[in-house]
Image (cartoon, rainbow, N blue to C red):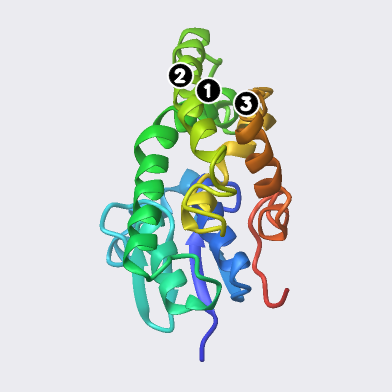
Amino acid sequence: MAILKLYGLHNATCTRRVATTLAELQIPFELIEVQLSKGEQKQPAYLEKQPFGQIPYIDDDGFILYETRAICRYIAAKYPAKGLIPTEPKANAIFEQAASAELTNFDPSATKLVHELVIKKWFGMGETDPKTVDEQHAILEAKLSAYDVILGKTRYLAGNSITLADLFHIPNAPLLAVGGNDIMTRKPNVARWYNELVARPSVVLFENGVKSTASY
């Protein structure tokens, strides 16, 4: 069987989210670097695979799939042994609840903060906007208060076993710290969960960027 191909950028957030899921399941893959600065993602051959001209997408032995969380769900469903997506109906509902919370309550503000604190510096996109940082920090701080309540009852967001709902917080959660923001360690239950999450081998592996991985 052909090795899975991940088309993305080594230091792009969504590329790392997919790579982290692959690493968690110890699935070998080849990173195909897409040169966004050269507009490769807007070329006709690329748009045939990813009609929005975005990264990442995967080629799994001829099966093409885009959208980061859809890719992660596909991978977890194809390799179900670690239970990253619970299948029992109630456990699955709790998982979907947690995954929705990440998408709607964590990701919007975290993404904007990471953009201001990290991405702008990495890609020479201008100065950090303090007003945006203050606004988004306040929003995320309030959301993490709810996280702290949830994580006071269970080890992870969807119960006592790790799921994709937790892994979806990579890479934005640790990138906040890279940008000098300590919001992930201010609340005790969030800090305990966050510190455990970022210490996982699948997360540590790509701290300095995603790379092709033939073995673990």
Disc 2: CA contacts within 10 A as few (<14), some (14-19) or many (>=20): some
Q: Quadrant of residue 193?
A: top right
Task: Between residue 150 and residue 8, name the one nearer to us.
Answer: 150
Say what secondary structure mark 1 lies in. helix
Mark 3–mark 1 distance (CA, rounded to whole Å): 23 Å
Q: Quadrant of residue 180?
A: top right
Q: Earlier in the sequence, mark 3 or mark 1?
A: 1
17 left or right, relative to 191:
left
195 left or right, relative to 69:
right
Residue receiving disc 3: 187
List x then y, in percent, for residue 74. 39, 70
Q: Earlier in the sequence, mark 2 or mark 3?
A: 2
Question: Given the current orientation, which residue lies at the most extreme top position?
Answer: 131
64, above or below 57, in the image: below
Residue receiving disc 1: 116
Tell me the amino acid under the disc marked 2: Gln
Residue receiving disc 2: 136
Disc 3: CA contacts within 10 A as few (<14), some (14-19) or many (>=20): some
Mark 2–mark 3 distance (CA, rounded to whole Å): 17 Å
Q: Earlier in the sequence, mark 1 or mark 2?
A: 1
Callouts 2 and 3 close, C-beta under 8 Å: no
- Residue ID at (35%, 48%): 97
Callouts 1 and 2 close, C-beta under 8 Å: yes
In this rendering, the label closer to the viewer, 3 or 1:
3
Residue 34's tag is none
